[in-house]
Every structure is written in structure tokens, then in C-alpha cells.
Amino acid sequence: MKPPAFDYIAADSIAMAVAALAEAGDDAKIIAGGQSLVPMLNFRMLRPSILVDINRIAGLDVIEETSGAIRIGALTRHYQLETSPLISRHLPVLSCAMTHVAHLAIRNRGTIGGSLAHADPAAELPMMALLLDAELRVASASGERTIAARDFFLGALTVDLASDEIITGIVLPKLPLRTGWGFAEVARRHGDFALAAVAATLTVSGGSIEQARIALTGVGPTALRGTEAEGLLIGHALEPDLTHRVVEAVRATIEPETDLHASSDYRRHLAGVLTGRALAAAWRRANESVA
Ligand SMILES: Cc1cc2nc3c(=O)[nH]c(=O)nc-3n(C[C@H](O)[C@H](O)[C@H](O)COP(=O)(O)OP(=O)(O)OC[C@H]3O[C@@H](n4cnc5c(N)ncnc54)[C@H](O)[C@@H]3O)c2cc1C
């Protein structure tokens, strides 16, 4: 398949990109890595009259440390995230998650901004943005705004982003001291989207859990946080009985769809198993960090 005809603008600044988007109205699409957009054009699921290419905008692909946080430009490629020493030092769960995204050739092109804007229900980056309490920086011709990841994902392939807005960056607070992490995913083949994946962080103090975060993908229209399950963990050590109750709480929270790849029941079962694995790894790493 070939895409329908479109006009093309290669923006060399954010100002130029947002001006082009504002002028085109609903008819324009940003192209970043093209790994999700181009297949959708080729299948004619989208028919924009103009593509605004943001790949030449300087400074949009930086990963930098600020006090207490890591700031990632929207054009940062998945492979950069996977291999960044700053990310592996302060957000190792994100480095690990990136190895599960597609294949290397796709990770060389795909961008964090594109993945968050596309919001595939089984993608890893929306899950990581929720897990790590990310804030997204967004710009348009009328100004800038910041939106928390928890408010950004509205439904399958649907986010709180107007057609004239561009994600410019993502800010992720560094993991606190005494925090361990775990990541567990099942996909049918290496490089496929997840049937289900779970990421967790546990911060421990005095032998018990002070802060717990659990995020899931592949088990609903959007990635989600297991907030109720997180609450069960606070103030306790991770014992088998507690893990069992948390796993059941996660299973009760989610409503996975049945599709060609797996039934709803299988995905619910899997999400529980993966939650147990992610929590066990997070608990082990948290305790190693205080030993
Ligand atoms: C075979 C295959 C397997 C894959 N497997 C996985 C997987 O296992 N896990 C996974 O997470 N992903 C997977 N992907 C998707 C891949 O990660 C994409 O790179 C990513 O989803 C989109 O990033 P992109 O930069 O390519 O965005 P593009 O394709 O360029 O754009 C995607 C959408 O985001 C919009 N957009 C892009 N950048 C911005 C921005 N800065 N601001 C606002 N809107 C923007 C575009 O207008 C478009 O609507 C797979 C893709 C393929 C082709």
C-alpha cells in the first residue's frame, strides 16, 4: 500500500512546527520516527493533507539531568533511552523496558514523543510514563503547558493533545533512594507488542514498604496504575500472602479485551503472574540497595 498524497514541511524549530500545525488546522500530522504513522498512512487509516516533520529541530533529542529529575526531549529515540548512562543510573526500570520495545531497527527511529502521542494500548512507554509519574511538556502557537501522564492517556490511541500541539519533552523524577524495580512482560515473539506487561517500584524503609508503584500495559484501552494494589503494600514487608492479595487486587482492577492474540481471561491471569514477578524483583533490589 502507498499513502495518499500529502504536502510536507520540514520544520527546523518548534516555532515553525507549531505555526504550520496552527495554519493547517485538523488536517496536519506531525511525523517523528514514522514507525506508527507511516503504516497508518500506508493502510490509509489516516489521510492528513500535510505532514510536519520535526526530525530537524535541534535540541529535541537531549537527555539531561536536572535537580531531582531527568528531562528527555520528545525526539529522543528508543535506542537512546535504552543505552543512556543517565537513564540506567537514575531510572533503570526504563532502560530495561526499552529492550522490550519492537526490534532494534524500530528502536533506532521510534521516539518517546511519538510513542506517548500514539498511545498504543500495549506500548511500554505510556506504562513507564505512568509508573514514573512523568510530566509532559506541550507547546502550541498559543503557548506552553504541562500535563501529568496520569491525565494524558484518555483511551486507545487517544490522548489529551490538540491537533495544533506538539510534545516537546518529558520530565521524569529520579527514583528515590532505597528503591528497587521490576519489569515483567510476555509477548508471543521477541519484538511483538506485549500480551501483558507489568512494571513496579518499591521504596523500603526499616524493612517495610514506604512507597509502591505498579503500572500495567496490554490489559485495557490504556496503560494504567494499580493504585488499589499499591495501597495494600504500604507499611508491610513483601510476604507471599501479601503478594497473593496484591495479585488478586490487580486482577480485579483490570478489564482486558479478548482479541486475536489472547483471551481476556488469559490476559487477566497473566497480569497477576507478571505482577508477582515484578514485585519480587523490586523487593529484592530494594533490599540489596539498603544492605
Ligand atoms: C513492527 C513494529 C513493532 C512495534 N512494536 C512495539 C512494541 O513492542 N512496543 C512499543 O511500545 N511500540 C512498538 N512499536 C511502535 C514504535 O515504538 C513507534 O516508534 C512509536 O509507537 C511511535 O513513535 P514514532 O516516533 O515512530 O512516531 P510516529 O510514527 O512518527 O508518530 C506517531 C503518532 O504520534 C504523533 N507524534 C509524533 N511525535 C509527536 C510529538 N512530539 N508531539 C505530538 N505528536 C507527535 C504523530 O503525529 C502520530 O500521530 C512497533 C512498531 C512497529 C512498526
Image (cartoon, grey):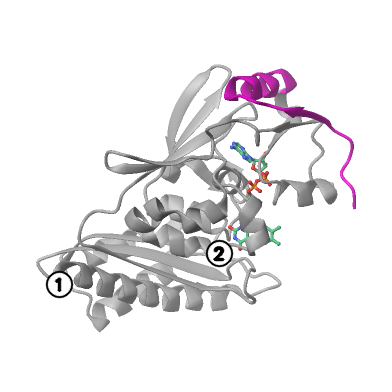
Q: Quadrant of residue 52?
A: top right
Which residue is tagged 1? 291
Magenta residues, start to end: 1-24
Which residue is tagged 2? 218
From this view, report whether residue 54 is shown above or below residue 285: above
Q: Position of residue 155 (x, y in %)?
A: 57, 48
Sequence order check: which comes first, mark 2 or mark 1?
A: 2
From this view, report whether residue 24 is shown above or below residue 1: above
Q: Residues within 10 Å of mark 1 (few under 14, many from 20)?
A: few
**Type of amino acid under label 1:** Ala
Residue at 43 percent of width and 58 percent of height? 94
Q: In which quarter of the image is residue 282?
A: bottom left
Classify residue 219 as left or right of residue 290.
Answer: right
Residue at 21 percent of width and 56 percent of height? 177
Residue at 31 percent of width and 76 percent of height? 280
Magenta segment includes 3:
yes
On the question of residue 222 being in view, the answer is no
Classify residue 215 as left or right of residue 44.
Answer: left
Q: Position of residue 156 (x, y in %)?
A: 61, 51
Q: Which numbered disc covers residue 242? A: none
Q: In which quarter of the image is residue 186?
A: bottom right
At mark 1, the secondary structure is loop
Magenta segment includes 130:
no
**Type of amino acid under label 2:** Gly
